[in-house]
Amino acid sequence: MSPRLKRLAARSPFSIHILKELFHPAAASGKGHSTHYSIKNMSIMANAPSPLIATCQMTSSADKDQNLATCSRLVREAASRSACMVFLPEAFDFIGSSTEETLSQAETLQGDLIQRYKGLARECGVWLSLGGFHERGNDWENDRRIYNSHLILDSKGSVVSIYRKIHLFDVDLEGRVSLKESKFTIPGPEITPPVSTPVGKVGLEICYDLRFPEISLALAQEGAELLTFPSAFTLTTGLAHWEVLLRARAIETQCYVVAAAQTGRHNERRTSFGHAMVVDPWGCVVAQCTEGTGLCYAHVDLQYLHRIRKEMPVMMHRRVDLYGKVASIQAPPNL
């Protein structure tokens, strides 16, 4: 084992196995573009057989057919490598160049696009996490806004869980950036309970939810073993906060964290950070994509997860009876 691998193994208290694929032909254009993986991009796993997951990275455009072709290629590639669940990023369906284009392209859950993804799940025999679907709700005729919805499809193509994003990203920095998600998006009404899947109990979140630990803690309290953050972080926030937030959520909840991501330039107004990754319950990055469209793989070892929780039972030590309360009178210092 090389010195670098020894250092990597020392970071994580479980047995290490590196997937042998150092080259991944995930094509952004389908014409020979490839994604190379360094040591940091490969999967770390405990004793097999642990279920294999695949986390996607892509550059969505306003062309829904082109995006579907990219997602289909990635899902089929993951299925060929025996992944049983594939995670797609926020806005896997499309990224519009304007609010008007976004609203005009949104569909209902009964629309053609979701039906085609259901067919893809059935064809490949895999579960799909479809994060950040632009959903027209039942109230579309009265409220011309949409939901940012995260769907889980089982391997038969059935929708088994839906979460609608509750935290909306509104920012207005004069002369720099202005984005008001609330102008065209309805906040979700509730946190969706974790859903049982072949890889464990999965808690659903989307992008900006990552900055609010309360939802992750609530999902972990309800039994989540994996937390999903399909995202489209900007370059600035991604460089500063992406990895540290994902690792923090993994450490404080003792969950696997799976973060599919948008990457690269979508249009003249929007570019995404990328770096799709998987973090284990100890807070180690165990899989990560490099530049461009591609996949990274990780094995989910629930025995390892529950050993961590047993040896460091932070959930049992939480003082939910006191959180949210601050003493009305400051106690004098104990001199």
Image (spheres, rainbow, N blue to C red):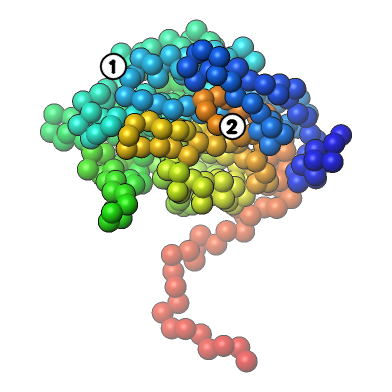
Q: Which mark is residue 111?
A: 1
Quadrant of the snapshot with the N terminus: top right
> Is residue 321 rendered to the left or right of residue 335?
left
Disc nearest the viewer among 1 and 2: 2
Q: Quadrant of residue 174?
A: bottom left
Q: Quadrant of residue 297?
A: top right
Could you tell me how far apart the alpha carbons at marks 1 and 2 are, in whole angstroms?
Answer: 31 Å
Q: Quadrant of residue 206?
A: top left
Say which residue appears at 77% left-offset and 42% top-offset: 8
> Is residue 237 rendered to the left or right of residue 247?
left
Say which residue appears at 35% left-offset and 44% top-offset: 166
* Mark closer to the chain start, 1 or 2: 1
From the viewer's side, name the closer residue of 259 and 217: 259
Say which residue appears at 29% left-offset and 29% top-offset: 96
> Is residue 107 rendered to the left or right of residue 193?
left
Residue position marked by numbered label 2 in the rendering? 289
Seen from this angle, which residue lies furthest bottom?
A: 335
Q: Where 32 falls versus 334 (above or below)?
A: above
* Percent position of residue 226, x then y: 57, 36
Observer able to see residue 24: yes
* Percent position of residue 294, x then y: 55, 24
Total numbered badges shown on the rendered structure: 2
Observer able to see residue 161: no
Q: Which mark is residue 286?
A: none
Callout 1: 10 Å neighbours few (<14), some, many (20+)? few
Q: Where 179 falls versus 19 (above or below)?
A: below
Type of residue at label 2?
Cys
Quadrant of the snapshot with the C terminus: bottom right
